[in-house]
Each structure stands twice: as structure tokens, then as C-alpha cells.
Image (cartoon, helix red, strand yellow):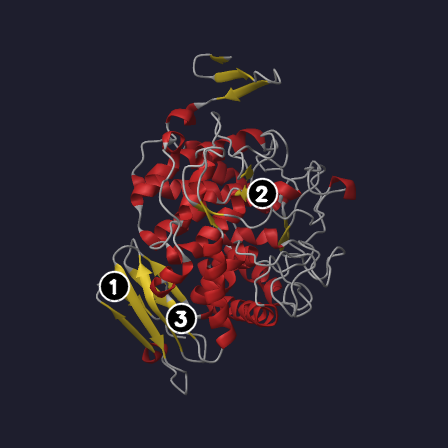
Amino acid sequence: MALKNDKIAIIHEDKTTHFVEVYIDPEVDGTNAFKAQQPEQKPLPEFASNWPSLPQLDWPANPLAVSGYRRTWEIAFANLRQPTAQNGFVNNYIDTAFNNHLFMWDSAFITMFGKYAHHSFEFIGTLDNLYCKQMPDGFIGRELSIETGENHLHRHDPGSTGPNILPWAEWLHYEQTGDKQRLSKVFAPLLGLHRWIALNRTWKDGTYWGCGWSCGMDNQLRVEHDKLDYSHHSHASWIDVTLHQYLSASYLIKMHQELASKEDVSDLENELVNLKQVVNAKMWDPEQQFYFDTWRDDSLSDIKSIGAYWALLTDIVPEENIGSFIAHLDDEKTFKRPHRIPTMSADCRHYKDEGEYWRGGVWAPTNYMVLKGLEKHGYHKLAFDIAKNHVQHVADIYGKTDTLWENYAPELPVQGNPAKSEFVGWTGLSLVSILIEFVFGIKMDVPNKRIDIHPYLAEGYSLKGLHFGSLGTVDIEVLPENGLLNPAERVKVTTGLDLYINIPSR
């Protein structure tokens, strides 16, 4: 039974369980083009035949990183899958490589390195399998079975969705490809999801609640009691979940402007104004110069989580606080550990030397998030230092184990405990995006036909066959420093494209 009442709600009774579902404001159902999309019938590409067309990097001083880069793509191509009649997916996709489920934020991060092979396989199409499963009221689940296509959790379960970083992922893809047609197609489902979370996951001051599963950092133990770990909100305002929504609203407004959309986004604009004020008034500790979760009585948590650094991807941090907030990343007492960056500060009571998953483990996705935030605020040299440290650890451990791992230990030159192997998976970020963008310092902006190059690495290196969207390819060679103080003297760019090449002076 499905009843519609003046377009306000759809009431559906499951024929098997007789459970009644009410979908409020089901306006996204008619605007989500992925719902009617036919399944892709394209064969999967093989690694061996596609490897020569992928960007080829050379770093003579670090052969392990170069070898690990190739191994990353080899594992990634081995994890490509096709939709089936049983799961109802619409696009070829990359398996998360965890538990036979497709995860929302894993998939979003995977697209952030997959963009470098977009000409061989549309990694971004993985997200289409989430969009096509959107419910009438805008909900998209965080975890789908790749066998049945069903949500792992009911949408009103605290762990059912999130982290909502899909608008960020789509915008990064747009910067790399200039694909405005896709941007237009994803805008409606992304807006629907944002509004569902805003309707169902906020406290009265506008901040958001989450849990270990919905924030993505399962066991970080940010709740009042151990037994509530993973699946309870603990009546707290969660700093990272709140920041995810601030980030989502910011990018949805950017998309709205880029597309000249006629959609009324005043709700998003008002939310940004409110959250900026509330987060800085209630979740910032001026003594510790850090953002924290807040408990139900508005007191601050004592867990210093890497999740606070989602703030750097936004404009939420007042200019006078930026320096002291970032300083924790370069402090050996907190986040500057032998392998940077632990997901929990080393002075936290739950911190573990071997990582113990999110209680100090070093993860490629959160590292990438922090690096992109540092880039936004012009901290390029610190981003380089952190990236080089991370890449070297990942490369060295690859050299010992011939594989990549789900996470890494912050204090020891080993993988995390626990950690899955052959994890590509979002660990593909380490020896692809983090290496290219923050160690090699190469950033592409296809819509504006621009490449920025920050050659902080003293050794020589090159990246050839880099696809600049669908416009053509670029070869970049950087000479060893050898006393050359002017960065522009070290860089040679070869391309038939008319591009603006920006090489900032030191």
C-alpha cells in the first residue's frame, strides 16, 4: 500500500512484515535521474592493458613508492565489479574491499584517487549505485549489500547513513574533469540527502548528532559509556558530523551557483550562518584551541579527534584561530607522531600505539582530508611534510609486505592492529593522490584550465601522461634542487593544451 497526501508524505506498508514506513516530503523521487537509469552493460577493464595509459610517475630516490603506486592500481582494478539483477545497481563500480558491502564514505574517498584513471574506468560511477537506491524522502544508506542491494541498517537507525561527504567528492571530481553534465545530474539527490539528515539528525541548536558508525570512525570511543560505542549518539553534538553538514551545504551552494540552478537554497544559506556561530560559540575550546564534541549539558568532551579538522575544509574557523588550531598537527605531544597523522591525539586517554583502529590508527582518508584543509589555508609546506612522512611509511611497509593496508600504526613502522590487507579501498589515496598532490605538489583545476605545482621535494621526479580532464595529457618533470632556489627553474611542463601553470615562489 502506498498513499500520497498532498505531496507531503508517502505511507508504505511492507507486504511481508506489515511494517509501516512514512516518507516525509518525498520531493526528490521525481528529480533523481539515477532512479530510472538502466544498468551499465560495459565489460570491466583489465589492469595489464590499461596500465600504460595511466599516469606514469618516476621518483628515482624512492623506488618503493613508485612500485607501490603500480601495485595500488593493480589491486584497484582487481576489485572492479559489475551490477547484477539481484543488487539492482546501475553502474560498474569498485568494491570497498571490506565485507561484501558498498560503503558511502569509503566509495567517496576512492573516487578521490580513482579520478586519475577516469579515462580507463569511471570510478565516480560507484556513487551512482548509492544514488539509485535513494529513498523517496532523500535518505541514502551508508552501507549496501553488493549481493542484494539492500541497506544494511534501517534509515532511522543511528548508524544508517554518513559521513555525508558526497558533495565534496563530486566537486573534486568536477575540478579534475570539468564534467558539468554530471554535476547537474547529482545535484538533486545530494540536496535530498542533505535535507533528510538536517530533518532527522539535528538538535534544537542546529548541531548534529552521530555515532561511531555514522561518523565513520567506528570505535573512537567518543561516547559517555563504553557500551554505547559504535551505535549510540550519547546525546552529544558531534563535531565532525556537524562539520560534514556544513561542508555539504557549502558545496551544494557552489554547485547551485555553478549550474545557475533555480532551486531555493535559502535553507542551506541560513544553516551555514547558524552553524558558524554555534560551532564557534559552543564547540571551540579557547584554552586548548581545538574543536570538541559537546555533551547534553553543553560541556566539552575531552577527546581530541582528527574529526575536528574537517573544519579546515570550510570557512568556519575564524582567522585568528587558524594558526593555533593547525599547530596541533606539528606538535609531538598530540598529532606529530612517528607516522603522521593519528586519528586520535597522543595525549588522549584512549590512544593506542598500534592504532587499535580509530584510537590512533593512521588512515589514508583522514590524512587526505587534513591535507586538503591545509592546502585551502595555504599551509603547503606543512602539508608536504605530513604527506612525505605518510607516503614513506606506506611505501616502506609495502616493501616489507607487498601490499597496502586498511590503516597503519602511529608509533611503529607496521600496519595497524587490526587492519585488512590488499586494501584498495581508500588506501589507494596514499600512493596516488597524496603522492601526486602533496609530495609532488601537482594540483589540477580543469574548469579553469590551471595547474599549480609546489616542488618542495628536493629530489627530481616526473609525472607523465597525466590526463587533464578529457582535453588531453600533460607531462611534468621536476629537476633535483641542486642549488636551484627558484622553483620555476626546476619545472618543465610539456603539453599541447593552453593552460595556466602556476609555480609559486618560496
Q: Is residue 369 left or right of residue 40?
A: right
Vertical relation: 355 (above or below) 101: below
Q: In the rendering, at what x and y percent does residue 7 appear?
A: 43, 16
Q: Tell me what residue is drawn at x 41 percent, y 80 percent.
A: 460
Q: Tell me what residue is drawn at x 29 percent, y 56 percent.
A: 448
Q: In the rendering, at what x and y percent does residue 305 appear?
A: 65, 53
Q: Is residue 345 left or right of residue 183?
A: right
> Any mark on residue 241, and which?
2
Is any atom of residue 276 visible in this view? Answer: no
Camera-nearest label, 3 or 1: 3
- Which amino acid type corresponds to the residue marked 3 in the rendered image? Leu
Q: In the rendering, at what x and y percent does residue 314 appear?
A: 48, 50
Residue on which the image places disc 3: 57
The residue closer to the viewer here, 358 or 201, is 358
Label 3 CA crowd tier, 10 Å (few <14, some 14–19, many 20+): many
Is any atom of residue 414 visible in this view? Answer: yes
Q: Is residue 389 left or right of residue 458?
A: right
The residue closer to the viewer here, 495 or 101, is 101
Residue on which the image places disc 1: 499
Helix, strand or loop under label 3: strand
**Which badge, 3 or 1, is on the more N-terminal residue?**
3
Task: Report how far apart the C-alphas of labels 3 and 2 lie in the structure.
Answer: 36 Å
Task: Report how far apart the C-alphas of labels 1 and 2 lie in the structure.
Answer: 38 Å
Q: Quadrant of residue 389?
A: bottom right
